[in-house]
């Protein structure tokens, strides 16, 4: 019996906080020092969500972009300073949003428990609440991250995957962060909510390569729909083209679900980095499994978010607890 509980405990520990063996992050980290921290984040998100349900996608992406560049240290929140362009002002972070919601949660938490809760943990809590709000699984978030003190736009392109990456490149990019091929496929399912600017995939519609102007892996009806939303860019230096946004999943745009994988099977992936998951033999069976077993994917997604949230974290006396998430202390 005791053995069984040890086993169960190990199983849950592994499931809920994948890398808890390697990082000192803990579920309930603020239980004594700031018991309302997580509920303040939740309330703040709830309020923002009533104004704009797109905030859920924005905060999930914010957590991803934070963790892949210098680890989950809230470096993505720091503003540029004279002589130093920060991550948030790089091309790769174009369209990243959610800063105001984090600021709001930060202010409310500071009022209750000053100098206690890191901005990096606030992002992780907000991403978890966003997943749940969008219809995903509620998962406990191990916390205790500390905030970094440096942010450089130069780090972004070197660390974030590109929208035209193939499976080899995606695999390599995630492996450098300690994430597996399967986790890469699982986490890509975040693209079942939110939007993309036309500029992130327009090449697929108008200038794919020297043989095909339109990506032959795109469903023709879907391509036509996209062309309607994304007219060919005709920018000049004085008159830049508009760059509209389109939903990743037009059928359930604010619901985080395995519809993403079904779309891939129908050649309706929005980015090249989405569609290649189905078109490449190495990942095709994973797409199939996620598309056939929604609960299996939902569970794996929560676990992979926890794992992603542990990338290169600062803990203990490292870094600082930023008073204002946009500025180093
Ligand atoms: C696998 C490699 C990935 C690539 C190449 C990629 C690329 C992109 C691109 C190009 C956009 C649209 C940006 C724009 O034009 O506005 C986007 C949006 C988004 N990405 Fe990813 N992404 C990847 C993985 C992830 C992961 C791991 C997550 C989170 C777990 C994520 C969450 C999101 C979300 C939620 C949006 C929509 C944001 C919004 O509506 O505000 N992505 N991604
Ligand atoms: C991806 O691209 C790289 C570099 O262009 C190439 O070496 C690799 O074979 C490609 N992988 C796949 C699966 O197409
Ligand atoms: C253009 O793309 C197609 C489909 O991905 C590919 O088979 C073909 O080799 C590419 N052609 C060139 C010239 O790159």
Image (spheres, rainbow, N blue to C red):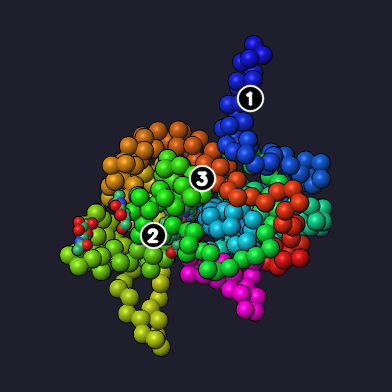
Residue at position x 63%, y 24% from top?
9
Of marks 1 and 3, which one's residue comes earlier in the chain?
1
Residue identified by numbered label 3: 178
Residue identified by numbered label 2: 163
For residue 103, side relative to residue 279 (left or right): right
Residue 45 in sight in this render:
no
Q: Which type of secondary structure does the marked residue at label 2 adopt?
A: loop
- Extreme residue in the bottom direction: 238
Residue identified by numbered label 1: 9
Residue 280 in sight in this render:
yes
Nearer-the-camera pick, 159 or 265? 159
For residue 292, side relative to residue 267 (left or right): right
Does mark 2's beta carbon lie closer than 8 Å to ligand 1?
A: yes
Residue at position x 60%, y 62% from top?
76
Q: Quadrant of the N terminus?
A: top right
Return the x and y of residue 292 as percentages of the image width and height: 36, 34
User: How busy is the neighbourhood of tag 2: few (under 14 within 10 Å), some, or many (20 plus)?
Assistant: some
Distance from disc 1 to disc 3, alpha carbons, whole Å, reads 24 Å
User: How busy is the neighbourhood of tag 1: few (under 14 within 10 Å), some, or many (20 plus)?
Assistant: few
**Number of marks in picture:** 3
């Amino acid at each position: 019996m005791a053995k069984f509980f040890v086993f169960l405990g190990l199983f849950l520990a592994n499931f809920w906080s994948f890398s808890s063996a390697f990082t000192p992050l803990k579920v309930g980290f603020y239980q004594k020092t700031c018991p309302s921290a997580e509920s303040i984040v939740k309330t703040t998100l709830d309020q923002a969500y009533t104004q704009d349900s797109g905030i859920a996608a924005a905060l999930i992406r914010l957590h991803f972009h934070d963790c892949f560049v210098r680890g989950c240290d809230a470096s993505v929140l720091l503003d540029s300073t004279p002589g130093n362009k920060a991550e948030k002002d790089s091309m790769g972070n174009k369209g990243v949003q959610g800063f105001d919601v984090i600021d709001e949660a930060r202010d409310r938490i500071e009022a209750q428990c000053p100098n206690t809760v890191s901005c990096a943990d606030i992002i992780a809590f907000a991403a978890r609440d966003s997943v749940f709000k969008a219809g995903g699984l509620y998962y406990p978030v191990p916390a205790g991250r500390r905030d970094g003190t440096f942010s450089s736009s130069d780090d972004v392109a070197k660390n974030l995957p590109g929208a035209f990456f193939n499976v080899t490149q995606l695999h390599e990019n995630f492996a450098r962060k300690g994430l597996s091929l399967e986790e890469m496929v699982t986490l890509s399912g975040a693209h079942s909510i939110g939007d993309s600017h036309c500029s992130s995939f327009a090449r697929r519609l108008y200038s794919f390569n020297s043989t095909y102007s339109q990506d032959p892996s795109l469903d023709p009806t879907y391509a036509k729909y996209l062309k309607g939303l994304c007219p060919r860019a005709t920018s000049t230096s004085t008159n830049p083209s508009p760059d509209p946004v389109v939903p990743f999943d037009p059928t359930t745009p604010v619901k985080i679900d395995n519809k993403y994988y079904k779309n891939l099977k129908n050649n309706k992936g929005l980015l090249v980095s989405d569609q290649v998951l189905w078109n490449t033999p190495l990942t095709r069976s994973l797409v199939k499994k996620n598309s056939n077993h929604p609960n299996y994917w939902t569970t794996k997604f929560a676990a992979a978010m926890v794992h992603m949230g542990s990338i290169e974290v600062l803990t203990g006396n490292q870094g600082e607890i930023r008073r204002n998430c946009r500025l180093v202390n």
